[in-house]
Amino acid sequence: MEHNDKLYDLLKNSKLELPFDDFESRMMQQIVDFEKTKVQMHQSKKMALLFFLIGTVFGMLLNYGLGLALDSYGLPQASLDKISFFSQLIYVILIVLFSDKL
């Protein structure tokens, strides 16, 4: 019988007290808020990917158009190659930096 009394005392002392009266409701609200933001972040990620792809296509078209415009000025081929190289280099660097953010 004494063994059961000790066990009962141990179990009685192991009762967990919540720090605040509304602790459980606050935690549940935080979980609900987290789930809402998770859905919003998923939608934002889709939009970011869409605009990244649109920007990539626009950048390629701009790069191509710039090359055609510079070609019409009659600059030497070496100058055109350098300008085209640096333009494409900047474009690639921007793509890598933005894709890293996604």
Image (tube, helix red, strand yellow):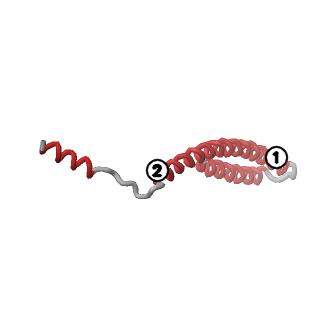
Please tell me in which quadrant of the rendered image residue 19 appears.
Answer: bottom left
| Mark 1 Cα shell of 10 Å, populated few (<14), some (14-19), many (≥20) | few
Q: Nearer the viewer, residue 65 or 11?
A: 11
Q: Are marks 2 and 1 in contact (CB under 8 Å)?
A: no
The type of residue carrying mark 1 is Gly
Residue appearing at x 46%, y 54% in the figure:
23
Mark 2 vs mark 1: in front: 2
Q: Quadrant of the N terminus?
A: top left
The first of marks 2 and 1 along the sequence is 2
List x then y, in percent, for residue 31.
52, 47
Instruction: Judge by depth and name the residue closer to the eye, 35 or 5.
Output: 5
Q: Residue furthest left?
A: 2
Residue shown at the point (21%, 49%) measured from the top left: 9
Where does label 2 land, which residue?
24
Q: Which residue is mark 1?
A: 65
Spatial distance from mark 2 to mark 1, Cα to Cα? 61 Å
Where is residue 43 drawn, in percent x and y?
Answer: 65, 42
How many labels, in total? 2
Q: Horizontally, is 67 left or right of 14 in the view?
A: right
The one of 62 and 89 positioned closer to us in this rendering: 62
